[in-house]
Image (tube, rainbow, N blue to C red):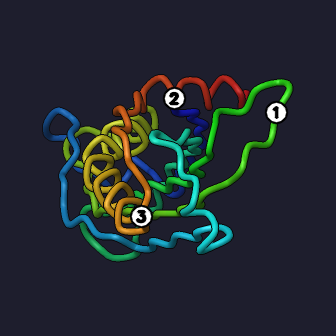
Amino acid sequence: MNDHNHADTLQGASGSSVPRESSPGLVVGSQYLRTLSIDVQNTPDIYRDIPAQPHVGMTVDVTARQLPGGGQPSFEVTLVIRAQGLDAAPVPNAPAPRVLYEIHIAYAGLFGLSGAMTQAIAEPLLLVEAPKYLFPSARAAMLNAVREAGFPVGNIQPINFHDLWQSRRLQQG
């Protein structure tokens, strides 16, 4: 079972410098791994009793920032995933199960906006649609690192970025 938390921010999205010629859209550019770290707890003893399927608790953060430069606005969108592999799911009588590993990944991409653009249109494009492009590669890099660290991996289901974005908006205001 995966626990998902979500936060998102948008910096600099302004519709004033985008031509208003066509319907709004997202232009996908390069994608890249910014950071990846994994900390395996209590080695080598941790490997003596690894569960067949560790519980993974995750938090997800999406940020978008406008990059300086002329012409059409360009944005860097970063998907940050922090996860812990636990030997069991937390329960009321055992709220702090043994931590097997902690992993942190920041996977980013360059995106542009095209067409008639306002803040109300730009925000969901950058904080909902852009992370959908980043997530498969970020998930693959994360699961590969966990596997290389010697732990069994399961599948991490896709994240519904729209629901998480809406939830975050309700929390903020």
Identify the residue position indicated by label 1 in the image. 94
Identified at 26% across, 55% down, the residue is 137
Residue at disc 1, secondary structure: loop
Which residue sits at x=53%, y=62%? 103
Q: Is residue 67 above or below residue 2?
A: below
Whichever of labels 2 and 1 marks the residue nearer the N terminus, that label is 2
Amino acid identity at mark 3: Gly
Instruction: Check residue 150 in the rendering and tell me which mark sits there, or answer none.
Output: 3
Q: Are marks 3 and 1 in contact (CB under 8 Å)?
A: no
**Outermost residue toward the left in this view:** 22
Image side of residue 82 versus residue 66, left or right:
right
Per the model, the C-alpha gap separating discs 3 and 1 is: 25 Å
Q: Is residue 126 above or below residue 45?
A: above
Q: Nearer the viewer, mark 2 or mark 3?
A: 3
Q: Foreground residue, 90 or 48?
A: 48
Identify which residue is drawn at 82% across, 33% down.
94
Q: Is residue 118 left or right of residue 45?
A: left
Q: Is residue 157 left or right of residue 91?
A: left
Q: Position of residue 151 (x, y in %)?
A: 44, 57
Which residue type does callout 2 highlight? Met
| Closer to viewer: mark 2 or mark 1 | 1
User: Residue at horizontal 28%, vertical 63%?
Assistant: 110
Quadrant of the image containing the C terminus: top right
Query: Alpha-carbon neighbours of circle 2 within 10 Å: few (<14), some, or many (≥20)?
Result: some
Question: Which residue is tagged 2?
Answer: 1
C-alpha gap between disc 2 and disc 3: 20 Å
Q: Position of residue 29 (x, y in %)?
A: 19, 62
- Packing grade of label 1 (10 A; few <14, some 14-19, many >=20) is few
Looking at the image, which is closer to me, 92 or 111? 92
In the rendered view, tell whether residue 93 sits above or below residue 78.
above
- Residue 145 % position (x, y): 38, 65
